[in-house]
Image (tube, coloured by chain):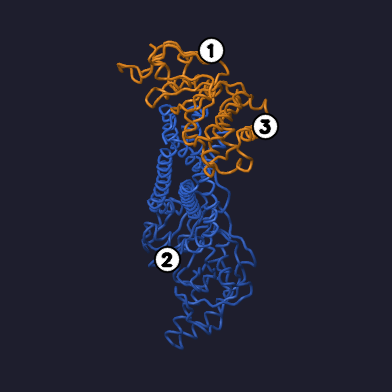
Chain colours: A orange, B blue
Amino acid sequence: MISLKNVTFKWHKNDKKPTLRIAELAVEKGERIFLYGPSGSGKSTLLALLTGINTATSGDVYILNQCLNTQSNTKRDAFRADHIGTIFQNFNLLPYLTPIENVILGCQFSKVRQSQALKHATTLHKEAERLLNALGLIEQYHHKNVAQLSIGQQQRVAAARAFIGNPELIIADEPTSALDANNRESFITLLFEQALHLNSTLIFVSHDESLKPLFDRSIDLTHLQEQI
Amino acid sequence: MILAKLAYKSLLNRRASVFLTLFTIAISVMLLLSIERVRVDAKSSFSNTISGTDLIVGARTGDIQLLLASVFRIGHTNNGVSWQSYEYITNQRGVKWSIPISLGDSHKGQAVLGTTLDYFEHYRFAKKQNLSFNQGHPFLNINEVVLGSSVANKLGYKLGDHIVISHGMGNTSFHHHDDNPFKVVGILNPTGTPVDKTLHIPLAAIDLIHARASTKNDEHDEHDEHDEHDEHDEHDDLIGHPKQITAFLMGFKSPLYTLQIRRNINQYKQEALLGIMPTVTLKELWQMLAIVEKTLQLFSAIVVLVSLLGMLTTLLANLSQRRRELAILRSVGARPWQLFTLISIESLLTTLLGCLVGCALFYLVMYLGAGYLQSHAGISVNIAMLSYYELTLIGVIMVAGFIIGLVPATRAYFYSLSDGMSIKT
């Protein structure tokens, strides 16, 4: 699923020390990984490599058996849109679209995800509704203004957007930092349900180690970097 | 498709600033179209005023002054042409027809023109069109009058009405108990020229009015008798014995005569005369007005430019606010070129709507202003479909709007490359 070998990353060619050094990282399909580390430990950098926003300075990054560092920008864009769903820390919903429209947006720039979504339901609209319901956003909120939703509700919309079209890899970047402990756990449970249902791999990034026991496996980024 | 939908929703979300941009564009389109329409129509009403006349002859003055006085009824000629000279010149070889005209009197602010029946036969306007009668027929007696269409409309005269025509250019009639008023026997069809605002009476009647005026003022019995005597004689003679006329129009059998006779007229020894070719003088006059025309065009171009720059400013200002929105779109899979397209569609949509609203405003203004322009400036504005030229203007604005939209679109393209998916709140 994911395989990194001897990867280094420097922001600038002249930087003496690389920002990130990973000797080896492998994730199997369907795994639920907890990736943690204090701020500055390179979490964002690693995510940027996994999603193909940046390419490794040296070493190989394979995702779904495709080598990201040799692909062109356009191809990486397409790859990301087709195979990776992301839940952002601040959700990144478009304020002028309804929750349903925001969810559908997740598969509107990818033919692959669109056809996947249509395997589950007759229309994209129905699939979005199904996902929102499954993630616990009741129907009366589906057509409201996104800005009127609570943080917790917005988060469900963001999660539904990541899941629509069944991408193989779901990356959640500190999605629970704005929630209290109870909501955090219930949200993660919902994420797991969906990931299991769709057989997606989940990488959950957080600095909050208390969530660690919920996951199959956890990776300490500080530790990972020191292995070299 | 999704991009068009997003563009639409995003525009709707920023409707206040979008509306302002749209409105500036609409106003500028409206201004540009109105100015152009009035300009083109003014030019055509202007050059349509007279046609088919080879030469206009009057007392020596400026070319343009003579044209203005004889055709547009603007200003006066200081002198007239003596009847002897008129007869001498029109009896030359090659003269096909001639129309003597006598101006200087008015009826309720409308010009009164004394002429002969040749006027109705030979006078041409626009594309060599004849004067035609809406009702009635040319004058046959000395106390009959033929009205231009707007005189009849404005003053509410019908066939068979009796009206009083006074001496002088004043708005008021000096003779309240005139015993011999004029009878309306004909009303002309609209021409869009000063003919519409003219009352046509026989040449002989002009002398009659003048004689009566001097009688009343002089209070000489002798004169009175003399005049009454004249009147009886002239009743069936529409020309009478005029001493002077204001000017006369001529048509020739061949253009060669035009130049020859014009030279003769300009060198005529007995009297200082001037012969002008109306088409040439019309062009000269229009060229004098060209500076006004150019200024108008310049202004409308500047208005369009300013509104487009305004749109650019708004788009660029919005863009930095929308950096986050663009990054979000990027994060859900939109490619940089798609964001480029999105911004382009938005500016195109704004310009398109601006142009449509502008056209609507333009028709509104034309509809409201046509009457005023017709009555105050004599420009008959055509509330027709947009001409090919006007569509081209709109096309140019659309293209300019699109090109201007490319500036923020290009910035959006590079934003999205450099921002990637990392979004700062």
* Viewer can see residue A37: yes
- Give residue B229's position: percent from left, percent from top: 53, 82
Rendering coords of residue A193 (x, y %): 61, 27
Q: Which amino acid lies under the numbered mark 2 shown in the image of this protein?
A: Val
Which one is nearer the viewer's eye here, A195 or B170?
A195
Q: Name the residue under label 2.
A: B81
Which chain is home to disc 1?
Answer: A
Q: In this view, does A223 lie above or below B216?
A: above
Numbered circle sitting on residue A217: none
Name the mark nearer the viewer: 2 or 1.
1
Q: How far apart are marks 2 and 1 (CA)?
A: 105 Å
Q: Mark 2 lies on which chain?
A: B
Which part of the image, by quadrant, shows the C terminus of chain A?
top left
| Quarter of the rendering containing residue A223 | top left
Q: Identify whether B191 is placed above or below B301.
A: below
Return the residue at label 3.
Answer: A123
Residue B421 vs residue A87, the one in the foreground:
A87
Question: On the image, numbered disc 1 is attached to which residue?
Answer: A65
* Residue B1 in view here: no
Q: Nearer the viewer, residue B253 or B402?
A: B402
Q: Residue at x 47, y 75 (%)?
A: B171
